[in-house]
Amino acid sequence: MKKIGIFIVLIIIVIIVIVVSKKDTTVVNDLQPGSTTPINTTPGTTDYFPTTGPGTDDSTNPSTDLPIEASVVTYSATGFNPSSMTVKAGTTVTFKNETTGSMWVASDPHPAHTTYSDFDAKKGYAPGESYSYTFTKVGSWSYHDHLHSQFKGMIIVE
């Protein structure tokens, strides 16, 4: 009987060790906007929280000048990627030209650009160049490449 009691105690200790060792200590590779420092989401720890960037007192870090939200859409030979993006009002979206030709981002409809008339690059951007626009109006804004109007996308502003 004494051996069974010791055996049960050992099993309980092993179970406790397993449960404690399985405690979730995963670090999610989320980034503070404008920072390359991952945020540690493990409760009770602070060793991976950013010390520079937006929301910190580091005025010498150039990332503090970035908007709170920033998103990138790439333009390639197959069109816009992602073709649809949801952002918060006030977000700056950058359209990066990764083709060998020019890109002219503009709101629909083609060629008038009247759906969101301010959202119009008004010129072509060469390969490697980017066009950025800050979306302040809530809504769903379809757009296209004015020079190749078959390529379309959508920005949803909440």
Image (cartoon, rainbow, N blue to C red):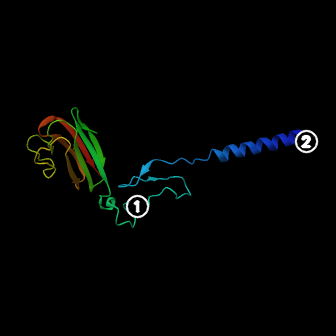
Q: Which residue is mark 2?
A: 2
Residue 156 in the image: x percent, y percent? Answer: 27, 47
Locate residue 106: give its quadrant: top left
Which residue occupies the extreme front position in the image? Answer: 60
Image position, residue 116 (x, y; %): 15, 49
Q: Is residue 3 left or right of residue 50?
A: right
Judged left or right of residue 147, residue 90 is right
Closer to us: mark 2 or mark 1? 1
Q: Residue visible at 26% across and 43% down?
A: 73
- Residue that sits furthest to the left in the current view: 112
> How many angstroms separate mark 2 from mark 1 (CA)?
60 Å
| Amino acid at dot 1 | Thr
Residue at point 52%, 57% (across, down): 47
Please state which amino acid type lies under the numbered disc 2.
Answer: Lys
Secondary structure beneath label 2: helix
In the displayed structure, 125 sits above or below 66; it is: above
Q: Looking at the picture, tell me which residue is in the foreground, 59 or 118.
A: 59
> In the rendering, at what x and y percent does residue 113 appear?
11, 45
Q: Earlier in the sequence, mark 2 or mark 1?
A: 2
Q: Position of residue 79 (x, y in %)?
A: 22, 35
Element under disc 1: loop
Q: What crowding class fits label 2: few (fewer than 14 Cα within 10 Å), some (14-19), or many (20 or more)? A: few
Total count of labels: 2
Q: Quadrant of residue 1?
A: top right
Task: Identify the residue under disc 1.
Answer: 52
Viewed as shown, does residue 128 lie left or right of 113? right
